Amino acid sequence: MTKRLPPGTPAPASGQYGLIGPRGGNTGQERTATRGEPLPPTPKSGMGYVMTDPTYVMTDPTREKFATQVRSETLATLRSLAKSEGRQLQALVEEALSDLIDKRKRARPRAHVMAAYEATHEKYAELYAKLAE
């Protein structure tokens, strides 16, 4: 497990830091911190932080800038959500895109599963029909 950092400690790296409760439980809240800057105060005594999502430098060759358009209401809601969670807008956009990609990947059967199904379809067609009901 990652070491819990108390508030006021200089952030070892830039990124998102999860807020950890006094007994070690994850609160589900995050704060953005810049490397070398002190971690912000916590709502309650005994709470601390753990790194949850490091910030990547935009010169990282695995990242690209892009532009898109969304409805004004969607963007306003996203900005509000980012502010309430203490996160950067780009972190929420990347999280949403990653979730969408994962969801779409899971929606398609894996190739070897489909190959096995097709190979046995003729023999077990009646059983498959009953299972589908």
Image (tube, rainbow, N blue to C red):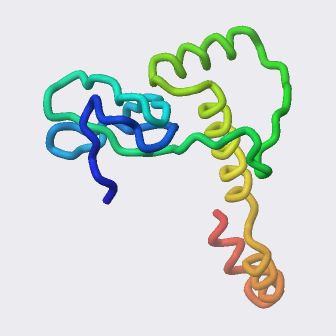
Q: Residue at x 72, y 49 (%)?
A: 101
Check the image and report above or below for 11 versus 108.
above
- Spot the residue most to the front: 36
Residue 121 in which image quadrant: bottom right
Quadrant in which the N terminus is drawn: bottom left
Quadrant in which the C terminus is drawn: bottom right
Whole-percent x and y of residue 93?
67, 32
The number of callouts visible is: 0
Q: Is residue 12 left or right of residue 132?
A: left
Q: Is residue 82 left or right of residue 75?
A: left
Q: Residue at x 66, y 66 (%)?
A: 132
Whole-percent x and y of residue 64?
81, 41
Residue 45 in which image quadrant: top left
Check the image and report above or below for 25 versus 31.
below
Q: Residue at x 73, y 86 (%)?
A: 124
Looking at this view, is 66 or 130 the one in front?
66
Looking at this view, is 127 or 60 the one in front?
60
Whole-percent x and y of residue 76?
64, 10
Q: Residue at x 40, y 37 (%)?
A: 11
Residue 78 in which image quadrant: top right
Looking at this view, is 26 or 87 the one in front?
87
